[in-house]
Amino acid sequence: MSFEMTTSSTLFERAKASIPGGVNSPVRAFGSVGGTPPYLVRGKGALLWDADGNEYVDMVGSWGPMILGHADDQVVQAVQEAAAKSLSFGAPHEGEIELAETVIERIAPVEQIRMVNSGTEATMSALRLARGFTGRDMIIKFAGCYHGHVDSLLAEAGSGVATFALPGSAGVTDATAHDTLVLPYGDQEALEAAFAEHGERIAAIITEAAPCNMGVISPGNFNEFLRRTADQHGSLLIIDEVLTGFRASREGFYGVDGVAADLVTFGKVIGGGMPVGAFGGRADIMQRLSPLGPVYQAGTLSGNPLATAAGLATLRQLEEPVYEQITTAGDALKRELTSALSAEGVPHTVNTAGTLFSVFFTDGPVGDYEAAKAQNTEAFAAFFHAMLDQGVYMPPSAFEAYFVSRAHDDAIIDRVVSALPAAARAAAQVG
Ligand SMILES: *Cc1c(COP(=O)(O)O)cnc(C)c1O
């Protein structure tokens, strides 16, 4: 069985003439799994419809933001009301304060916060601020951690960079790359050695709160170790919660391991589907930002009224019952994934961090990028297409988290589960 994809195929071919690769973000092109991406026309709750009229259960959730499901009534209404009053002011309005206060109320280490327009902007700005605050140049990042397409952070990044096995990216200067030290995730000795050699020059360690862009990896007590090490050397700790924020728990991953960063970055859920990011943290650091301090940072559309309305309407609904629902649905899926893949003898490892999880198509354990890259990506591609053919839209890469929303109720999970045996068989045939 295969879905009719004539309209999507035609659109994809047409797109390639005017948009590089036909897409505005690489992983959407299905490069690592092959085939044609469905062109989507509508979503409601956990369901998506494409231009050929096919219906899918959505396991991508726009890569995280749609934690309430698509076209949530309250979010849509909030955006419509805001839109009627102007799409943008480029000037202060009360919604910005409400969103800032909402985040600060939830996440204790965040004393002040500034809105930007993407997760990339958030990490880029946090790095500049860390450098401006400490007067140091170097940044430590971990292999397989993705922090957006910031020049200096593209070295051994996960996500699309993992999928496409790029060494980093063309167009990043040696000088920029030179100020970034890339260490294996979870490697305490490597971190100590780096600080022993460069300690005085290291402005900050940046890490994903829990790596989710090379597949999901639990940090264990690594964040705590990073906190201690940063403190010993006068460096800052930047915890990237763009993906985990308001998803791993009500307080993000901070609510899971309680490690307080100096700066925290947000994106995805905080915008409820609008283009939003934010970075926040210690007030003494945040007050080094322009107009108070010497670190320049700005944005024509930052704090946009539609974006803040969508973010607020989303965060206001994100209370414990939502996280319980997501956990229950995720647990059921993990159980059934394991049983379907085991039944067909497909090597796999299921990793969990907070409410987040993913499946690696390799015998585990998977604790770093090297182990994640040992996956059988062809087996994943076969699995992916068998799921898609049965109306389940999984992330089109073996290196991504699976996204469950509040709208993934029992009936939706049953639809995913019933597709698993055939998909596991397809993966087993690739071997
Ligand atoms: C998605 C992501 C980013 C980048 O966010 P964009 O909005 O795509 O720029 C940064 N860090 C992490 C951990 C992410 O998952």
Image (tube, rainbow, N blue to C red):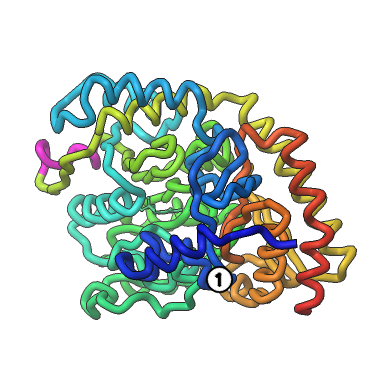
Q: Is residue 8 visible?
A: yes
Which x, y percent locates residue 149? Answer: 34, 62
Quadrant (top left, top right, bottom left, bottom right) of the C terminus? bottom right
Q: Which residue is mark 1?
A: 369
Q: Is residue 188 visible?
A: no
Q: Nearer the viewer, residue 216 or 36?
A: 36
Which x, y percent locates residue 341? Answer: 82, 63
Q: Nearer the viewer, residue 377 or 285?
A: 377
Q: Say if 127 sits above or below 91 in the image.
A: below
Q: Secondary structure at mark 1?
A: helix
Is disc 1 surrounded by few (<14), some (14 to 19) or many (20+) residues within 10 Å?
many
Asked if residue 187 lies left or right of residue 18, the reply is right
At 31% from the left edge and 72% from the top edge, which residue is drawn?
Answer: 198
Which x, y percent locates residue 83? Answer: 28, 25
Asked if residue 306 lies left or right of residue 8, the reply is left
Q: Say if 396 sits above or below 327 in the image.
A: below
Does the Cβ of the disc 1 residue fall within 8 Å of ligand 1?
no
Extent of the magenta region:
284-293
At 68% from the left edge and 31% from the top edge, which residue is drawn?
Answer: 325
What's the residue type where badge 1 is placed?
Answer: Tyr
Type of secondary structure dominating the magenta stretch? loop
Residue 57 is inside the magenta segment: no
